[in-house]
Image (cartoon, rainbow, N blue to C red):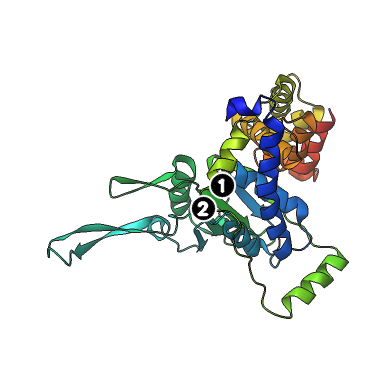
Amino acid sequence: MNSSLETADAQQVTEIFLEQVQSVRQQLKQTIVGQDAVLDQLLICALTGSHALLVGAPGLAKTLMVKTLANAFHWRFSRIQFTPDLMPSDITGYELLAREASSGITEMQFRHGPVFANLVLADEINRAAPKTQSALLEAMAERHVTVGGQTYPLEEPFLVLATQNPIEQEGTYPLPEAQLDRFMMEIHIGYPTREQEKEIVYKTTAEPVEIPESRLPGDAFLKLRRTVRAVPVPEAVVDLAVDLTIRSRPDSETAPETVSNYVAFGAGPRGSQNLVLAAKARALLEGRTSPIPADIEAVALPILRHRIIMNHRAIGDNFSVDSLVDSILNR
């Protein structure tokens, strides 16, 4: 596939990719009103096989977005409601003593938990205790779970889309930095415009919203993901991705003054990797066979914002991480 994208057939591969993905895009927009940028960011995460963190107030269709995405790619979907009393076994599954019906032999058997799906919605992820978070982190990072000393692989593709409520912080646990770094993007979902909200009201107060049936065969997604991975990247685009990530670190010589003043810890190498990977997917979505610097700039905010740790001075001066990423981009 890599060689095919570097030949004269590259445009044809892109057109086939676009034809398949546009049907998914249309399917998402039929169900979700007024969140086009968010839907494209979700598509980029899906097409690169990456996890995403959705941050938004209640009632902004976060759960509906995730369910529609799973249906569009013909994925097995599961939802986990995170609560303070959620246990690791409620995510991974558990072993129990059971008797075989045929032989009558009693032995330990593993019951799969909801994490054994293609797309897992971790709803209000920051409400669970750290011990439970670690069970999900193993699945996100290693694509397997360990129960009773036995390792069980997760089926590909495997994605976690987690939600956080930015309003209610009482009774929540901050996500560990190692877990935050496993999310490709932190996607912020804003309120719709007045006209969009009117359309939402018309749609949701008549017949129940139906999620369209999948238009892609079950294995089509893995082919799309291989196409994204095979996209060649110019050195200038890689340089920009690495430079942006390095500028976010306060000890860097190229860091702007805002970073030196307000950042405790900057983004790590996984930030650079995700910038390039997301730029590849965005280039294909825009009908191009190779990413350009504008693709890096377009995905920089959702990829870097959760990887930068602000210091106490930033909190005191009310300086946001989004403003900081803008200053890095402007430089």
The image position of residue 53, as x and y in percent, is 62, 50
Q: Quadrant of residue 248?
A: top right
Give amino acid for label 2: Gly
Q: Which residue is mark 2?
A: 218
What's the mark number on residue 202? none
Give amino acid for label 1: Phe
- In contact (CB < 8 Å): disc 2 and disc 1: yes
Q: Which residue is mark 1?
A: 221
**In the image shown, does 225 or 142 lie closer to the viewer?**
225
Query: What quarter of the picture does the N terminus occupy?
Result: top right
Query: What quarter of the picture does the C terminus occupy?
Result: top right
**In the image shown, does 330 or 116 lie closer to the viewer?**
116
5 with respect to 117 (left or right): right
**In the image shown, does 174 or 305 lie closer to the viewer?**
305
The image position of residue 218, as x and y in percent, is 51, 53
Farthest residue to the bottom: give it: 206
Callout 2 crowding tier (Cα within 10 Å): few <14, some 14–19, many ≥20? few
**In the image shown, does 203 or 264 lie closer to the viewer?**
203
Q: Is residue 181 visible?
A: no
Q: Secondary structure at mark 2?
A: loop
- Residue at x 60%, y 25% (from the top left corner): 3
